[in-house]
Amino acid sequence: MRIDIITVLPELLESPFSHSIIKRAQEKKHVEIFVHNLRDYATNKHKTVDDYAFSGDAGMVMMIEPIDRAISTLKAERNYDEIIYTSPDGVKYNQQEANKLATFENIIVLCGHYKGIDQRVRDHLITKEISIGDYVLTGGELAAAVIVDSIVRLIPGAISDETSALTDSFQDNLLAPPVYTRPAEYKGWEVPDILLSGNFKKIEQWKEEQSLERTRRLRPDLLDE
């Protein structure tokens, strides 16, 4: 899988992609991640990528020309399954969307910044807009990092135990059950006996019951879905 990210602040993405699972996935060639500086596609000597809004509103707007040039350059080299724009008014991101994106071969993520991007980019170049929550960030770089992380961990081989990702919260619209490790007793706080029983059929039943109970108590909206 290849992920191309277009941003005005590539430095913000250096650390998230240089550690842990994402780093190992790149080293093993399970995924290629390329971060492109939008200013490299600007045409004037100042590398300008933003300008004032025609409406006179406060805040700067990302210009259409460098964005179009960046996306067109990448599309000339390969086909892309999705061109994503990180935006607070995009579709709310969830596990099901991550599962879908993880099956693609090539995607582009355009990081929003300033007051936003020229609407014509959204109308003619973007295929999907994604929001990671109902709040506004300084830029879309952190959102892009979240999206990439959620995708990469689902790619076969990225995690040593591939079944682990399949039992995460939200995979079946349920929260994951509680988990425990050694010691079995600490300060009088004990691990549930069922988990020490060795009866795997009953343990799985307990996990299902706990998962349903936690979802009903903490995120009942997921059950409605």
Image: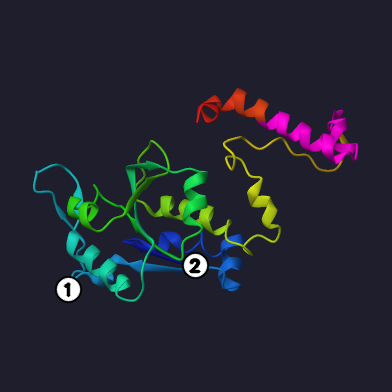
Query: Residue at the location (37% across, 65% down)?
Result: 80
Q: Earlier in the sequence, mark 2 or mark 1?
A: 2
- Along the viewing direction, whichever of 98 and 225 lies nearer the viewer: 225
The circle on residue 45 is 1
82 shown above or below 59? below
Query: Residue at the location (24% across, 63% down)?
Result: 67
Q: Are marks 2 and 1 in contact (CB under 8 Å)?
A: no
181 shown above or below 62? above
- Name the residue type under label 2: Met
Labels in figure, total: 2
Does the magenta-highlighted stretch encompass residue 190? yes
Kindly state the secondary structure of the residue where label 2 is placed.
Answer: loop
Query: Residue at the location (64% across, 49% down)?
Result: 166
Kindly state the secondary structure of the residue where label 1 is placed.
Answer: loop
Magenta segment boundaries in residue numbering: 187-211
Query: Residue at the location (74% across, 35% down)?
Result: 207
Label 2 belongs to which residue?
Answer: 1
In front: label 2 or label 1: 2
Residue 205 picture location, percent across and down: 77, 33
- Name the residue type under label 1: Lys
